[in-house]
Each structure stands twice: as C-alpha cells, then as structure tokens.
Amino acid sequence: MNIAFLQPDAHALPNSRTVSLKVVVRNGSGEAWRAADGFAIAYQVFDAGTAALIEDGSRAHPAREVAPGETMPVSFGIALPEDDGSYQIFVSAMREGAYWHYDRGWPFLLLQAVVRNRQVEVKGTRVVTKSQLRLRRLVSSIPRALWLPVTTIWRNRSVIGAMVRRDIQARYRGSVGGAVWTLLQPLLLILVYFFVFGLVLQARFEGSPGRSGFALYFVAGVLPWLAFSEAVGRAPSVIAEHRNFVKKLVFAVETLPVNLVISGLIGEVFALIVLCACLLGIRGAIPASALWLPALIVPQLLLTAGMCWLLAALGVFARDLGQVTALLLTVWFFVTPICYPETLLGKLPHSATLLLSKNPIYVLVRGYRAVLLEGQAPAFGPLWKLWAASAVVFVLGHACFHKLRKSFADVI
C-alpha cells in the first residue's frame, strides 16, 4: 500500500454545487513527502459518462515533511459544473509537473457526485486503483453494450424508416426506372453472373445438372450475399456522406449504418420473391422448410449491422477504407461457393477447406439452399455458431462505433 485515505468525510454544502471533503492521508510509501519536491494531494473532476477531464483542481501541499507511516490532514471545497450530470472526483497524490500517482497504480479516493438543478448530491466514496476502476467500468458496461444497440434501433425506428425511403429515392431520383431499379439492379447482377458461370463456364451443381437447376442454386446462394455486400460496401463512406448530421446532437448517427442494412434487405426481399415465383413455375411448389428462413435472416442482419457499424466508424479516420473493403468483398465472394459447387472446396488442402468452412456467408449460402431448394432445415451445428458469432460482431461493432463517435465531428 503506497497511500491510505482515512476517515473520509464528503458531503454537499447546502444550496450549492460544492462538495466539502475532509480526509486524513497516511504515507504508506518508502519515502518522505515534501512540498519542495512538488508532492501534493490534489483532485481532478471527470464527466462520469465520457471520462472527459473537466477540472484540474487545487493542490494541498504538506505543511511539513511527512515521513513513511505518518499522516497529513487534507480538506477541499470542490465546485462542480452547473450542468446537470454525473461526475467523478479523483483525489490522489501527485508530483507537480511530473505525474499523478494514480496513473502509476497508487490507490486514490473516488467520489461519485450528481448535479441536478444546480444542487449536488454525493453518491459515495471509495478507495480504488485505476486498474480496478477500469475493470469495474468494463464489467458494468457489458449489460449496457448488450441492450444499447437494440434499444437504439427500436427508439429510432421511425427515423430509420424515413431515412431508408429517402436513401432509395435519392439513389434513383431522375432515372427513367425510378424505384423499380431496386428490383432491377439485383436481377441484372444475377443475370450477369448466371451468364458467365452458367452459360459460358458451364458450372453445374450436383443434383441439379440442368441450367434451370444451376439458376435456382445460384440465386438461392447469392441472396444473402447481395444484401450483405451492398450494405458493407457502402458502410465506410456513410458518415462522410451524411456529415451534416454528425454535429446535430439530436440525431442518432448510429442509425446511418442500420439504414444500409435495411436497404440491402429490401433488395434481397425482391430477389426472394422472384426466386419463389421461379420455384412455383419450375417445381410447382415452395417447400415448407422455407419457414426456417427467419432463423437465417436474423443472424445475417446482426452480422451485417455489426460490420457496418465497425466499418462506418473506421471509415471516418481511414478514407481509403472503402477501396480496401471493395477489394476484400470481391475476394470474399469468390472464396464462397456461390457460383460453383461446394465439392470444389474438397480439392483444396484440408487446412484451407477447414478455414473456408468457418466463413459465415458460406453458412448462410448453405442454409438458404437447404431451406429453399432441398426441403431441409439448416444444419444446427453451423447455425448456432453463426448466431453466436453474429451476436458478438453486432455488439462489438456497435461498441466500437459508440466509442469513436465522439471524435467524428473533429475529423469530418
């Protein structure tokens, strides 16, 4: 123990924003404390929500040399800001112009205070170290990290709906087809891939040797990819495209990446309707196993939203991330068995096959084909792992965005 805080007495002064603190500090280090060496007991005030330093407070220098084991009384009148909110007060040893001892692992006295209507209330005091405080913040932030993304989306659902409509209208405003391009664009892309792989390269899937069989398997496999790649490909630039919203405190910029996810899902829904019409025309029925689709779409949305949040946040600071993402998406597409049968993966070395089998898009592609074309439920083993991985990406992606968003206005 380097220092001890004994008999702390902290209370709010009536009709003020001032906290009165009296404490006895014991020297538990192996050296004497001297004012001539710059030693002092001082305090700093931080915003509890953002951990931003608000005030570097006054110093209490020892009136005489404090030898190891001796004590010194300290008292402060700590005036907190007028703004309502929660604040943390660090009372720590320090050396003027050199360092604060709490940064070096020494214990410090932590005061929790709340200002409301220009009145302060002391919520508690305790002695902690910086590492202990960091661990407590991490543990306490876990529940918030789990529910905050969901509540943010739900609370701003009307804004998301309006922004999605605006995004679709803006993309095709002035074009001849208008919003019809929402349907035509994925269909034309599917036709191009079908022409190259189905007609020119004569690729075929086992169990469906004909061209119609290839077309069904290809479309079923490309459905999740279209929604995923469109949203992820646009994510790095979405904050820059809406920079006028960043400095508006009333606008939740977390919704911007979500708009991309919903827009991509709308395109997938149109393509899914076309596939179902083809199934009715070619096979005469849609299998009952198609009811398993929500079990695939939900983790797909979680995965896409998490990656969009992460890329949107990083794209603010790395402007060329969009080009890198586009390249990686191209590679990702071709290492996923969408345009070719999965059996071709068996010709690769076992280590490469094992790695590619962990591809979450591969799990989605396999699942879509199983429920839409093969009349089977998706394999449970890969499915629960996909759910778990997607949930982790969803939470971590939002946490990263939430952590970095306060710096967006300084960079945009």
Image (tube, helix red, strand yellow):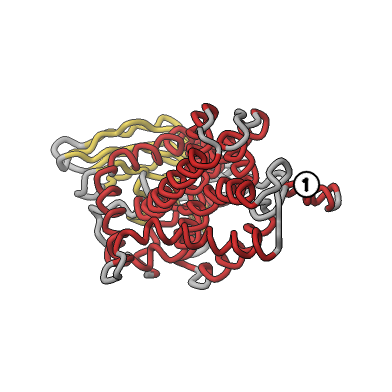
Count of numbered circles on the image: 1
Is label 1 in a helix, a strand or a loop?
A: helix
Q: Quadrant of the N terminus?
A: top right
Please give the name of the residue rendered at 36% of the width and 45% of the height, measured from the top-left corner.
49
* Along the viewing direction, whichever of 155 and 337 lies nearer the viewer: 337
Counting from the top left corner in percent of width and height, residue 159 is at 25, 48
Closer to us: 220 or 265: 220
Horizontal side of 328 relative to 23 (left or right) equals: right
What percent of the width, then of the height, locates residue 183? Answer: 39, 56
Q: Residue at horizontal 45%, vertical 32%? A: 143
Q: Nearer the viewer, residue 277 or 99?
A: 277
Residue on which disc 1 sits? 343
Q: Does residue 88 appear left or right of residue 374 in this picture? A: left
Give the residue displayed 71% in from the left and 59% down from the top.
Answer: 202
The reply to whether residue 60 is visible in this rendering is no
The residue located at (44%, 56%) in the rendering is 404
